[in-house]
Image (cartoon, rainbow, N blue to C red):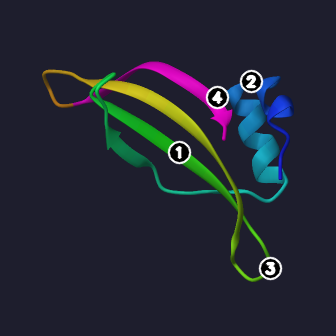
Amino acid sequence: MVDLKILNGLSFIGAEKYIIEVGYIECECIKKNSGECDVICLYPYILYDENNYIIDEVYHSEYCMIDADGDLNDFKTEGIGA
């Protein structure tokens, strides 16, 4: 499991590189409707044990508004964390 203090001290690219190097796997984006914005996009990184059980999960989140064309535009992002 990663120490969130280490991740918070890194840039997004550095944090992503670090968690992938220690064995986390990037998984498919999860989109959730939100009262704060139109959609929150969560990008999970999951660490599995040798029996394929989840040991830990961390997420990168993007808070998005949907424009007139139906495209998602992020207005706030949060670094990788639990």
* Rendered location of residue 7, percent (x, y): 79, 32
For marks 1 and 4, give the CA distance: 10 Å
**Residue 77 forms part of the magenta stretch:** yes
Residue furthest to the bottom = 51
- Residue 21 lies in the magenta-colored region: no
Q: Which residue is depicted at the point 35% across and 26% down?
A: 64
Q: Describe the element under mark 2 as helix, strand or loop.
A: loop
* Residue hosting label 4: 79
Residue type, numbered disc 1: Tyr
Image quarter where the C terminus lies is top right
Provide the residue designation for mark 2. 11
38 or 73, which lies in front? 38
The residue identified by callout 3 is 50
Q: Say whether marks 3 and 4 touch (CB < 8 Å).
A: no
Residue 50, quarter of the rendered image: bottom right
Mark before the other along the chain sequence, 1 or 2: 2
Of the residues under marks 4 and 2, which one precedes in the sequence?
2
Residue furthest front in the image: 35
* Disc with the residue nearer the chain's start (2 vs 3): 2
Q: Main secondary structure of the magenta part?
A: strand
Kindly state the secondary structure of the residue where label 4 is placed: strand
Magenta stretch bounds: 71-82
Left or right side of 58 for 9: right
Q: Which mark is residue 43?
A: 1
**Mark 1 in CB contact with mark 4 (< 8 angstroms):** no
Q: Nearer the viewer, residue 21 or 65?
A: 65
